[in-house]
Image (cartoon, rainbow, N blue to C red):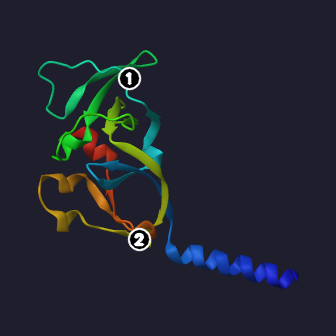
Amino acid sequence: MVDLTQSTASRLARRVGDRGPVREFLMFALAGDLYGLELTRIKEILSPPPITMVPRAPAAIVGVCSVRGLLVSVLDLRRKLRLVERPLTRRARILLGAAESGEVMGLLVDEVRHVVRLSAGEVEPAAAALGGDVSEFVLGIGRPAGEFLILLDLLSLVSS
């Protein structure tokens, strides 16, 4: 009985080791497609509070909001990725993350789904194949459970 348990544990350890290191991504919907951001980069998920528009702000910036006394710039990912815009729904969320400068930024998304764990073998590099202006924001393509997940680089999104 003990040998069976040890052999099962060693088989599981080998299987996990073969896949490479596992990273967690927060999956969210945007314009009907699925995207992901590395979970370690996301500080908090919020329902959108009132957002104040800022004159002469970059086109992708929706405005600013206050989160527990902290002023947060809100970036519309639809605008940033040049997707079709639409009004916010009750499922819209703001993902809080930090830029390289340490500034907290909010990313407006249509809907947060769940966390996905992907090994290095499940992520295909795709930035070069995509081409165009938005390819600099793409880390790769993940395929969890038969789905197609575009993995984005948070630092590239908020720094540019």
Q: Which mark is residue 150?
A: none
Q: Residue furthest right?
A: 1
Asked if 130 appears above or below 87 in the picture, the reply is below
In which image quadrant can residue 33 be found?
bottom left
Res. 100 visible in picture: no
Which label belongs to residue 146? 2
Residue 115 appearing in the image: yes
3 vs 108: above or below: below
Quarter of the figure that contains the C terminus: top left
Front residue (pair 9, 90) = 90
Three-letter code for the amino acid on which mark 2 is drawn: Gly
Q: Amino acid at mark 1?
A: Pro
C-alpha gap between disc 1 and disc 2: 34 Å
Q: Nearer the viewer, residue 40 or 108?
A: 108
For disc 1, the neighbor class at 10 Å (few under 14, some 14 to 19, many from 20) is few
Q: Residue at x 88, y 83 (%)?
A: 1
Labels 1 and 2 touching (C-beta < 8 A): no
Residue 67 in the image: state x and y as whole percent. Answer: 42, 21
Residue 146, position in %: x, y?
41, 71
Earlier in the chain: of badge 1 and badge 2, it is 1
Query: Residue 64, image x and y in percent?
Result: 29, 22
Residue 144 is left or right of residue 132, and the answer is right
Residue drawn at x 38%, y 36% as measured from the top left? 93
In this rendering, is residue 95 above or below 27?
above
Q: Which residue is mark 1?
A: 49
Q: Which secondary structure lies at badge 2?
A: helix
